Amino acid sequence: MNSGESGNVAVIECREVTKVYKGAVGRRGMPVCALAGVSLRVGGGTIIGLIGPNGAGKTTLLSLIAGLILPTGGAISVCDHPPRSLEARRSLGYVPESPAFLPRYSARAVLKHHAALHGLSKAGISEETERLLAELRLEEYADRAVGGFSQGMRQRLALAVALLDHPRLLLLDEPSNGLDPIGVIELRRVLTGVRQSGATVIISSHRLGELEKLTSKYVFLHQGRIVTFGGETPVEQTARLRIEFLPGSPGIEEEVLASYRPLEKSDTRLVVGVGGIEDVPNIVSSLAKAGAHIVGVALEEQDIEQTFVRLCRERRAFAACTCAGWGPVRRSS
Amino acid sequence: MFAWTGCLLPLVLSAGIFGDDIASGRIRMVVTEPIHLWELYLYRFLGLSLQGAVHLLTAGAVILILHRLTGRGGIGHLAVWLLASWLIFNAWTALSASVSVVARRDQNAMVVLLATIAVMFPLYMLMLFFQDSLGTKVYHEIVRYAGPPVELLVKMGRGKCSLPGCVASVAHSFALIALYGAAGILLLNKREFTYVAD
């Protein structure tokens, strides 16, 4: 089970969530296991990057949290409510990978329509609409039909819709798709503001460089499972600590294993994933107390791209995805 | 008026009422908003029902004007026919909108039409060859009371039922509309709104 916590109050809690897409006619009748026993707990006021290779189950996880699809097994709660409840929907804003709107509506009409669905008063609808048009720099295009919008413009409008009524949780599926560099910078500014207001943001993206500018917390999905990295989910480790020591010190690995996941082990070397330099004294002092003869310590900083590539390589021999009660299933990739 | 506006127009108007939004992904932007799915169904149904009412009132006004101008035909039961047409319009709309939750626009009306044929053709054959059999009678009653109430409303429009009978027909029609609507809402609640392999 993957578990972990960020913050005190859980905005999202997934317990052993499994999602199997039943095999449809024309898809060779084989069920597809998209998620297998995913457990995750995310607190407030944080930005989390949801990363993983194609077919890892990122969009499925976001769709489950948004209540768009139903889990095959396990339980999900959004702000302590089931995802399809009214309370959960009041708390969340969702931006799909390809947002779609009625093409004849203007951006202003779309925002007013969605603001009305939030149950805002007439004054509140106008106020929220104008605030978000300004915040997302959409005023110039506010009265144009959405059907003529580019992908980037639709993304910005979808983000504006998701930000209506100040959600506690924002789910973004590839939000920078089609955005120009200025749009990406604007997106970063908006999301930073959202986080500062105490909301939680989950971003699924393949643009790791962009993610890195927003957060250091990641959930790595691979073949429908969360890959634990250093024993925590979401992971925050982006560095490797290499420790060289003399052989023959029993119990050293156990000392490290208690808190950190070893990435490499040999008689004279131990490599563990750590969050940063602040973790080094703890590990070194634990090892020293356990009687290790340390001869060298080196911290190798890794950016998220390197971490991603390494995790993908490590998981290459990952066991076949199995979902309890469903027998053999096809992997989602 | 009963056949066109009451029975055929709803199939055209309600085709893809949910299917289009589901296929284009627009529904994902709506169902994540704080709104009950039954509200979504109800508002769309009421929108269609209003369109039906406008069509029927316009048709009624045209019939009235033509009658005044030409003096042909009878308008004694016009109001009852308008009510009967509106009720059957709503029944077909609720049925078709519910089918729309699970069928694409291009299949929506076809599914309703084929289902109607699949139900009516055996009934027609049974009535032709086994009119007095108990099975035929039971099947006929099921179709009469569980299917769109065409027969009962035509009877009402022709003025062939008493006032309590008419009231019962109206109540029966509303009950069926509610039943078809409830089935649509149930399907909407069970429905998943995306399937993406990533």
Image (spheres, coloured by chain):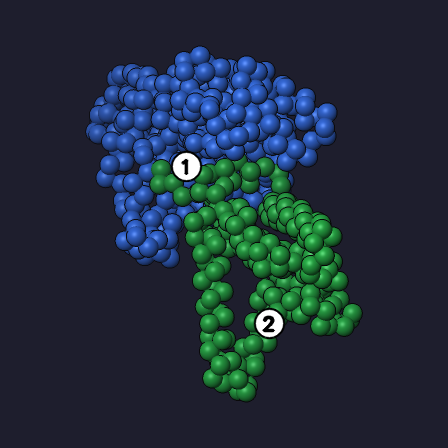
Chain colours: A blue, B green
B160 vs A296: above or below: below
Quadrant in the picture for residue A10? top right
Quadrant in the picture for residue A313? top left
Dot 2 amino acid type: Arg
Q: Position of residue A150 (x, y in %)?
A: 43, 22
Q: Kindly identify the residue that appears in the image at 47 percent across and 84 percent down.
A: B129
Q: In the figure, is residue B153 to the left or right of A4?
A: right
Classed neighbour count for the residue bearing mark 1: other residues with Cα under 10 Å, few (<14), some (14–19), many (≥20): many
The mark found on residue A59 in the picture is: 1
Q: Secondary structure at mark 1?
A: helix
Q: Position of residue A124 (x, y in %)?
A: 70, 26
Q: Kindly identify the residue that appears in the image at 56 percent across and 71 percent down.
A: B143
Q: Position of residue A228 (x, y in %)?
A: 37, 35
Q: How many marks?
A: 2
Q: Kindly identify the residue that appears in the image at 42 percent across and 24 percent down.
A: A151
Location of the C terminus of chain B (image quadrant): top left
Residue at the far right: name it: B163
Nearer-the-camera pick, B125 or A35: B125
Q: Are marks 2 and 1 in contact (CB under 8 Å)?
A: no
The mark found on residue B144 in the picture is: 2
Whole-Å distance between the Cαs marked 2 and 1? 47 Å
Q: Nearer the viewer, mark 2 or mark 1?
A: 2
Location of the N terminus of chain B (image quadrant): bottom right
Nearer-the-camera pick, B42 or B73: B73
A20 vs A47: above or below: below
- Pointer 2 and pointer 1 on the same chain: no
The mark found on residue A33 in the picture is: none
B138 vs A93: above or below: below
